[in-house]
Amino acid sequence: MDSVATQSILNMISHIIFIIITWKSLQSLQLDGIFKKGRIFEARILVILVTIMIGTTVSNFFLDLLQWSQNLKYLL
């Protein structure tokens, strides 16, 4: 049971860290030019959703990679 709780905390922290990294990365882009004038709210929502999508995808990749590397001990 303790392992499940540890895994859950690791997953949450990983997702949050990668979402923050993605947010900081997207802030370096000038996305103002692709949105219509006066659509600031919609643009912010889109950037937030894209940030969550990219961050969780990258986090899942690294968590899968970690799990696969731990499962290699069963190969031998």
Image (tube, grey):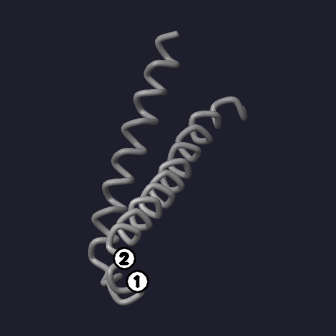
In the image, what residue occupies the spot 40% across and 85% down?
36
In the image, what residue occupies the spot 58% across and 41% down?
69
Query: SS for tag 1?
Result: loop
Point out residue 50 in the picture as x, y percentages from the top left corner. Answer: 47, 64
Q: Which mark is residue 9?
A: none
Which residue is denoted by mark 2 in the rendering?
A: 39
Q: Is residue 67 left or right of residue 24?
A: right
Amino acid type of the residue tagged 2 in the rendering: Arg
In the image, what residue occupies the spot 36% across and 45% down?
16
Q: Residue furthest bottom?
A: 33
Foreground: disc 1 or disc 2: 2
Q: Is residue 62 above or below residue 34?
A: above
In the image, what residue occupies the spot 64% across and 34% down?
71
Which residue is denoted by mark 1 in the rendering?
A: 35
The one nearer the camera, 22 or 40, is 40
Q: Quadrant of the C terminus?
A: top right
Q: Is residue 66 above or below residue 76?
A: below
Q: State the separation of the CA atoms marked 1 and 2.
A: 7 Å
